[in-house]
Amino acid sequence: MSSRGERIPEILAGFLTVLVLLVLYAPVLVSALFSVVTIQRGTILWETFSLSSYATLWSNSSVLQALANTAIVAIASAAAALLFGIALAFYTRSENAIGRRSIEVLIYLPFLLPPIVTGLSLLVTTSALGVGRGLFTVIIGHTIFVLAVAYRLVSTRLAALPPSLLEASADLGASRWQTLRYVLLPHLASSIVTGAILALTLSFDETLISTFVAGDQMTLPLRLWAMMRVGFTPEINALVTLVLITSIALALLAAWRLKPSWSEADSSD
Amino acid sequence: MALELVGIRKNYDRLEVLPPLDLSIVDGEFLTLLGPSGSGKTTVLRIIGGFARPSGGQLMFDETDITDLPANRRPFNTVFQDYALFPHMTVRDNVGYGPLVQRRDPARSARLVSETLAIVGLAAMEQRYPSQLSGGQRQRVALARAIVCEPKVILLDEPLAALDASLRRQMQLFLKDIQRQIKTTFVFVTHDQEEAITMSDRIAVMNGGRIEQLGSPRDLYFQPKTKFVATFFGDNNIVEGVLAPGAGEVDTPLGRLPIDRRGMPAIEGRCIVAVRPERMRIGGENGAAIAGQVAEVVFSGPMTRILVAPAAAPELRLDVRLSSDAGQPPPQVGERVTVVFDPSDAVVVPG
Ligand SMILES: Nc1ncnc2c1ncn2[C@@H]1O[C@H](COP(=O)(O)OP(=O)(O)OP(=O)(O)O)[C@@H](O)[C@H]1O
Ligand SMILES: [Mg+2]
């Protein structure tokens, strides 16, 4: 009797978990389903199954252009954020760094503030300076946004480096560049890869900053937004499905790499 | 003279860690810096290695001033206390790192790395990573990584501190053996006086940033020059006293003790008399005699340790070591005895 009573919270928790998962993922599954079949009055018409919406998407040059833009922006902003993140981490972790706390706050702030602030201020700045808006300004916006993540990962890893390793490298005759190449970068490699994946994920579906500074350029989320204003088509579902699959895959990859066991295994190989 | 520290000083902000310090290290010797925690041993070693900048003074190597030479251009290599092995490199790559960054001839380097790994007995483990090695093995990789660079001086900062007692003794002999083979100058840091005695050609005893005494282990053991060395270095019976100028006797709480002034610096006034436990006897003729009562007898195999409370000052303890003798039982606790030592075995230092 009592054992059944005790199990009630457990059953409730299980039920809630299923419910939450359903609410979270049902729309994903529905849009994926909508991209391949037609649904009429609540019934799925399996005989209408086709991948034609994906084919249409593939021949839609504006979508392809947006996809290319998104890739360019994601790669460029991830690379720039990592480069700046590494440089900043070297500075803030160096022995005689001045104002380390304030620098870190400045780096983290754009990530914590609503993206609308970053987007708006970039918009104001570019128009005040008379800079044309386009992919370049989107790259700047995304770099500012993902810098926090890149910096955080690299500087944490850098702090875990025993200073005696750098001394040992110098002791054995290495120049600063050789120490960077043979000791520092290999030590940071895992955090750089993880940082890159996270930065790509964030940039891939970033919409708000892009809206403000993209000018007449389109990224994938912006294209999607524009298409939806005209009306829902199987094409949109196909695009949503692709965006979701890519985001989830990148996020899972990042989560797997961020597992604590990874960094331990990494230090021994 | 290979390596010379001339008036080397070190301050951290207003804290003076090393007052001006002079030290000459001879080519090919095994020199140990011995001293309690905080006495400045690591600081001296880091200044020699080029990891810490002296606040003043000069560092000379083979008559050249190397005070401003960066660490990577000094012909010295360090074995770090935490070994500082590169975790992402195999044993072989760790050892080959020096020759690689110094752009030595690759074929010759490869041969040299293999030879060095064989010397330290790690040839079979060259493809392992540091995390796959035991403490003693890591220690040997660190040593191999230093000697493969053929340095003029090897600096070792308490390299054996992390090892357990038996492995430690094994590594002491091993290090000494390697040093004899490669004939390189070793500057070794430890706070373990026994380790210093077994390994060193010369020992510099450090205290509060100063070198109290520099000499061979025998010198320091039998002729300590200061109270600190007499107490820090090995067990000693120590009693304070007053010495009249030119007198052959010291007034102590134990009575007047005769001393042998030959070969001793001119000391007068307050002083310390020190006699090694193994130079004391129970009973017998000739020499200084102190009456007392046996307080404790400790059998430790080859030696038996007898603690005697002197009649004149029962709160003190005289430490006497006799070699254990199966045929002759040691005195019993409570027995009245006379402790005797030869005046020439008594060392007198300023108090
Ligand atoms: N970076 C530093 N800043 C301030 N003081 C320091 C610094 N490094 C060392 N000291 C001080 O200098 C003195 C000597 O330190 P050092 O490390 O040379 O001692 P040590 O003889 O090696 O001691 P141990 O046996 O504990 O390693 C100590 O009092 C220490 O507190
Ligand atoms: Mg030290």
Image (cartoon, rainbow, N blue to C red):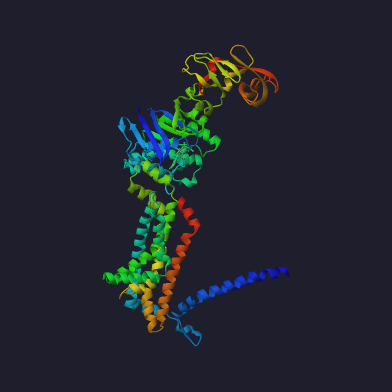
Q: From the top left corner, tell me how far across and down residue A260 is, in percent.
A: 50, 57
How many tags in the picture?
Answer: 0
**Vertical position of residue A219 compared to residue A95: above or below:** below
Instruction: Name the quadrant of the N terminus of chain A.
Output: bottom right
Residue sticking out furthest to the top: B286
Nearest the viewer among A202 and A87 is A87
Q: Quadrant of residue B186?
A: top left
x 50%, y 74%: residue = A25
**Vertical position of residue A108 compared to residue A56: above or below:** above
**Vertical position of residue A147 compared to residue B162: above or below:** below
x 51%, y 42%: residue = B134
Is A142 positioned to the left or the right of B34 in the image? left
User: Quick check: can you spot residue A53?
Assistant: yes
**Vertical position of residue B151 compared to residue A267: above or below:** above
Is A108 positioned to the left or the right of B278 in the image? left
Residue sticking out furthest to the bottom: A41
Nearest the viewer among A11 and B234 is B234
x 50%, y 56%: residue = A261
Nearest the viewer among B37 and B100 is B37
Q: From the top left corner, tell me how far across and down residue B142 is, in percent.
A: 44, 40
x 51%, y 76%: residue = A26
Residue sticking out furthest to the left: A130
